[in-house]
Amino acid sequence: MIEVSAQSPRATSGITARERVVAVEHLTKQFRDFWMRARVRAVDDVSFDVLRGEIFGLLGPNGSGKSTTIKILLGLLHKTTGRVSVFGKLPFDVAVKKRIGYLPEESYLYQFLNARETLEYYAKLFELDHATRRRRIDELLDMVGLAAVQFRPVREYSKGMQRRIGIAQALINDPELLILDEPTTGLDPLGTRQIKDLILELGRRGKTVILSSHLLGDVEDCVDRMVILYGGKVQAQGTCDELLESRDKMTIEADALDDATIAEIDELIRRRTAGAKAISRVAKPRQRLEELFIGIVERARAARIETAGAQHGGQTAAFLRADQASGEAVIANLLKSEDAPGPAARSTAAAAPPASGPDSSVLDELIRPAATPPEGPSPSSTRTPQPKPAADVDLGMIGSLLDPGAGGAASGDSTPGKPRS
């Protein structure tokens, strides 16, 4: 069993609640069968903290309790015992959900939707306005390399391409806490490198990232601190340097040396250590397989060799970069002020004279016929006589027409002043 590092998050008593994004204390999750008998203990007395702006690794083999812990943090599962808080609140608090982005281990997507429709759907769940939705979707599709195939149904995507769209939906709300469960599953080495670069970029911006994986090489390049689980228990935790640094060996890197120089160095080491230590191995450094693979692909792209797969993603989406955060807030405030002017602005606009210029004159010409009818009869008035105002109506003529005894009025037989029956 690996020894737990002496430096534990529990020992950091000086950390304030504001700096602690996730707090897990003595968490236990026990699954039971239909008759409520204990079946398996997936998480057993797990404790750790995740600090603001930290990239935290949750590591372990399959079945070690990683996904169960994540589901408890998201409020998808109830804990058996222990205490869990996210942003200082319970995981079931709905207000917390808006600040979290989550990529599950398996991407559950609507197969009949295309990539753009999928991101549009998730953006509407977060109640983003139309302009923000469109801008972020364009940036994310370019970032994950799916802009060229954005109108193809998701069911036609490969597993790696579906994983890319899953990563985009986890970032659509620009979350403060990003939880990634096996994010590089199904991705090629290029996609894997891009996800690692994205995680580092989010960490530099101050985002908090929880990265769960059993691919240790991917995690080693990204995380600040980590917890290693096995059998539902914490087996080790600490920083990468604390857990990975070898205490009994040392590496000296230099330019290529001949055998005589190496022999002299070996003799010097033996003489200084009384023969107890010597050079145990001499070898030339090797590049990593990932670096070799990416170099080959980049040369093929430079030669313009076509491919039917996902393209290499572009730069990190602008709204995820630190240099764009303040600009977006300023633009949003300006748009809000334009859409809803205050009372003073409305009164000023009402009292101000009409603006001069071509546009205002055209509006005046269009409004004037409705406000002030032109003098003289119009063609329409000659065809259809308009009714006279009530003051010009001859009431006497109407009365004579309604009087049964006024039949001779037309021939002049009526006597003026004669009372009507």
Image (cartoon, rainbow, N blue to C red):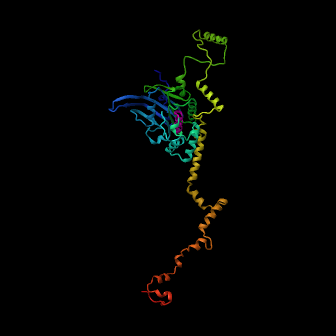
The stretch in magenta equals 158-170
Q: Quadrant of the C terminus?
A: bottom left
Q: Where, by quadrant of the figure, is residue 139 drawn? A: top right
Q: Is residue 376 above or below residue 114?
A: below
Whether residue 191 can be seen here: yes
In front here: 302 or 272?
A: 302
Q: Where, by quadrant of the figure, is residue 218 drawn? A: top right
Q: Is residue 39 above or below residue 250?
A: below
- Magenta-span inclusion, residue 161: yes
**Residue at position x 60%, y 59% from top?**
349
Picture coordinates of residue 228, whole percent (x, y)? 48, 26
Q: Where, by quadrant of the figure, is residue 80 drawn? A: top left
Q: Main secondary structure of the magenta part?
A: helix
Picture coordinates of residue 144, whole percent (x, y)? 57, 36
Q: Is residue 36 left or right of residue 126?
A: left
Numbered circles on residues, count: 0
Residue lying at the far left in this picture: please name it: 35
Q: Is residue 379 left or right of residue 52?
A: right
**Residue at position x 59%, y 71% from top?**
380
Whether residue 208 can be seen here: no
Q: Quadrant of the N terminus?
A: top left
**Residue at position x 63%, y 19% from top?**
253
**Residue at position x 59%, y 42% from top?**
326
- Magenta-span inclusion, residue 133: no
Q: Is residue 272 left or right of residue 416?
A: right
Picture coordinates of residue 67, whole percent (x, y)? 45, 31
Picture coordinates of residue 170, whole percent (x, y)? 51, 38
